[in-house]
Image (cartoon, rainbow, N blue to C red):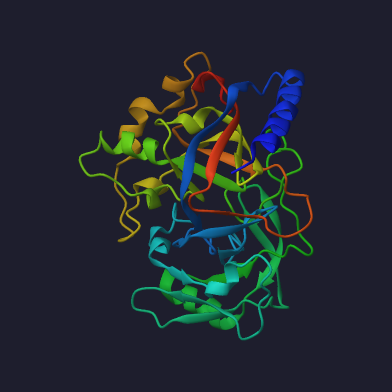
């Protein structure tokens, strides 16, 4: 929570910025719109997430989020879109790994498990072998190769040649789309550093489904409660524990939400239902439809360049809205 004097100072600052920026409409007043109810990281892209009570912020997202990527024999990143069984891979990190100032030793391991497989231990100390020609979405570059044991493990489970690589932040940079968040970077996430979804939005969807779906179908980093359904569509600037996040773009959904994360089996829902009320045609009728479906808000951390420690958010933190749109029709997509 912010004290009143600090909150007033921040609000005046935001109001001045908003007056100079037509793309950011201020709220009538800073309002506590919701509270953080869950936090998630996904250390290996497209594998199962880890629920946290507190998460350390970094310029690329929460610490350890999407640091690793499974690639095929051409170096292309694999996701559940093509390999839905990746949803069955569980990842365990040392509890102390999520402390902001913790540094791994060679004896510190990430443990990976999957049905029918022995546990795989991957050292959290950075490897020295380089994998060239790694690509995910629009980005290509080099990455750190986690070695033959990891390669064989993922090859055996997926059923085709695979390697496990880690983002090499010492030599590589992956900018997000500069049209939406210039100057921001990511690791192996689909594009942006954070994905925020509200409990109200999930509840609103589940009321329309014959079989409700859990939040793990949508793989958010920040899950909040206490706001109206889809209120997050409108948030252009929020504070969580005094840290400023910008809502930059509604999250367009692929087939992954149709995959049961407990079984790895895909279906039609909830995408078929979402088409009826969360498509671009419905939300933004004056724009040319592109067949997209939206659920959640992509966000970036505005204060990412500041020094010091203590940059964490935790369950129970308030979400203070500093800027919002008046309608989803105005939202960036």
- Asked whether the viewer can see residue 313, the reply is yes
Figure check: 140 above or below 240: below
Figure check: 211 above or below 284: below
Q: Quadrant of residue 262?
A: bottom left
Residue 204 placed where, x, y %?
A: 32, 33
Q: Residue furthest top?
A: 286
Q: Residue furthest left?
A: 210
**In front here: 273 or 204?**
204
- Asked whether the viewer can see residue 77, the reply is no
Q: Residue at x 72, y 47 (%)?
A: 175
Figure check: 12 above or below 216: above
Residue 270 placed where, x, y %?
A: 32, 40
Q: Which quadrant: the N terminus? A: top right
Residue 178 placed where, x, y %?
A: 72, 37
Q: Residue furthest bottom?
A: 107
**In front here: 95 or 207?**
95
**In front here: 31 or 331?**
31
Give the mark count: 0
**In front here: 299 or 131?**
299
Q: Which quadrant: the C terminus? A: top right
Figure check: 115 above or below 209: below
Q: Residue at x 65, y 84 (%)?
A: 106
Q: Is residue 306 left or right of residue 191?
A: right
Q: Residue at x 54, y 39 (%)?
A: 319
Q: Is residue 259 left or right of residue 54?
A: left
Residue 328 placed where, x, y %?
A: 50, 23
Q: Residue at x 44, y 81 (%)?
A: 119
């Amino acid at each position: 929570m912010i004290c009143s004097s600090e909150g007033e100072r921040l609000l005046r600052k935001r109001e001045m910025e908003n007056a100079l920026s037509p793309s950011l409409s201020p709220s009538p007043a800073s309002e506590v719109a919701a509270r953080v109810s869950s936090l998630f990281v996904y250390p290996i892209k497209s594998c199962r997430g880890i629920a946290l009570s507190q998460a350390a912020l970094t310029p690329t997202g929460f610490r350890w989020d999407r640091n690793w990527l499974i690639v095929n024999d051409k170096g292309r990143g694999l996701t559940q879109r093509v390999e839905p069984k990746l949803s069955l891979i569980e990842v365990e990190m040392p509890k102390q790994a999520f402390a902001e100032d913790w540094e791994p030793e060679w004896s510190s391991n990430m443990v990976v498990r999957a049905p029918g497989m022995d546990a795989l231990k991957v050292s959290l100390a950075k490897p020295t072998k380089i994998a060239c020609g790694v690509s995910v979405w629009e980005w290509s570059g080099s990455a750190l190769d986690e070695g033959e044991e990891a390669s064989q493990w993922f090859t055996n489970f997926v059923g085709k040649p695979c390697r496990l690589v880690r983002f090499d932040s010492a030599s590589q940079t992956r900018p997000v789309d500069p049209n939406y968040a210039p100057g921001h970077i990511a690791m192996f996430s689909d594009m942006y550093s954070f994905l925020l979804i509200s409990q109200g939005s999930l509840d609103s969807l589940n009321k329309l489904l014959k079989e409700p779906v859990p939040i793990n179908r949508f793989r958010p980093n920040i899950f909040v409660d206490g706001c109206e359904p889809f209120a997050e569509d409108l948030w252009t600037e929020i504070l969580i524990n005094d840290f400023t996040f910008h809502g930059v773009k509604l999250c367009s959904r692929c087939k992954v939400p149709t995959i049961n994360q407990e079984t790895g089996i895909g279906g039609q829902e909830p995408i078929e239902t979402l088409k009826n009320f969360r498509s671009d045609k419905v939300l933004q009728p004056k724009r040319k439809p592109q067949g997209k479906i939206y659920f959640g808000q992509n966000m970036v951390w505005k204060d990412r360049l500041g020094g010091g420690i203590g940059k964490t958010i935790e369950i129970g933190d308030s979400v203070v809205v500093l800027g919002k749109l008046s309608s989803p029709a105005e939202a960036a997509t």
